[in-house]
Image: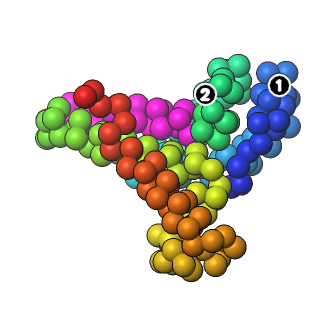
């Protein structure tokens, strides 16, 4: 995972993009392209479609750098949010077209698929947007199968701190399924 983006970098990058610096777009792309592509692929399960969404997201950013609002979070979170929206939009279009052409499936099945893909993308978005210490703890515990003691040792923190990070990370992730639902 990429390291957290400092707010100062975010402001400078937004200014450079607003001035139309091609080098800024290249630097921005280098930093966030893998995030954008992986989130798009998570929703669409198609490399070509994820490539297209990646181009669309960076095209939008190039044309609309002022749409980033630092009060809403860091640039990493903004890019992830843009990607999720575009990928879900593309999924809806593709599934609606497939339904119209074949008549197989239903609008209900389409919505189920979109909801599942949206929940997966939200979970990825939450993980990529959470602070680096929480992400690192979750990666160690769940992807590398470390228990909280091993996680604490690997991170150089106390066991209580490792448990706190894991608990908070899991609480953030648990919100992925309830996101956007009306009570």
Q: Which residues are magenta?
A: 80-103
In this rendering, does residue 169 appear at all? Answer: yes
7, above or below 35, in the image: above
- Is residue 82 shown in magenta? yes
In the picture provided, is 95 more to the left or to the right than 7?
Answer: left
For this rendering, which residue is in front, 20 or 52? 20
Q: Position of residue 83 (x, y in %)?
A: 53, 37
Q: Position of residue 61 (x, y in %)?
A: 67, 28
Cα distance in 3D space between marks 2 and 1: 17 Å
Marks 2 and 1, the one that precedes in the sequence: 1
In the picture provided, is 140 more to the left or to the right than 23?
Answer: left
Q: Position of residue 71 (x, y in %)?
A: 65, 25
Residue position marked by numbered label 2 in the rendering: 72
Q: How many marks?
A: 2
Residue at point 16% right, 35% down? 108
132, above or below 72, in the image: below
For this rendering, which residue is in front, 137 or 16? 137
Residue at point 54% right, 78% down? 149
Label 2 crowding class (10 Å Cα cut-off): few <14, some 14-19, many 20+? few
| Disc 2 secondary structure class | helix
Residue position marked by numbered label 1 in the rendering: 15
Label 1 crowding class (10 Å Cα cut-off): few <14, some 14-19, many 20+? some
Residue at point 35% right, 31% down? 180
In the picture provided, is 33 more to the left or to the right than 144?
Answer: right
The label number, if any, that marks residue 62 in the structure image: none
Residue at point 66% right, 70% down? 157
92, above or below 44, in the image: above
In the picture provided, is 72 more to the left or to the right than 42?
Answer: right
- Is residue 148 shown in magenta? no
């Amino acid at each position: 995972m990429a390291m957290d983006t400092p707010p100062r970098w975010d402001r400078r990058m937004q200014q450079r993009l607003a001035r139309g610096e091609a080098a800024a777009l290249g630097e921005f792309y280098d930093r966030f392209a893998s995030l954008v592509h992986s989130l798009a692929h998570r929703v669409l399960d198609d490399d070509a479609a994820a490539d297209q969404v990646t181009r669309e997201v960076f095209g939008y950013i190039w044309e609309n750098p002022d749409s980033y609002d630092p009060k809403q979070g860091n640039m990493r979170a903004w890019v992830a949010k843009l990607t999720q929206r575009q990928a879900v939009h593309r999924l809806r279009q593709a599934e609606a077209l497939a339904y119209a052409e074949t008549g197989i499936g239903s609008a209900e099945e389409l919505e189920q698929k979109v909801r599942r893909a949206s929940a997966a993308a939200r979970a990825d978005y939450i993980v990529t947007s959470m602070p680096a210490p929480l992400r690192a703890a979750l990666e160690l515990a769940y992807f590398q199968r470390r228990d909280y003691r091993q996680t604490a040792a690997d991170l150089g923190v106390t066991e209580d701190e490792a448990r706190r990070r894991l608990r908070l990370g899991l609480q953030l992730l648990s919100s992925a399924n309830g996101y956007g639902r009306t009570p």
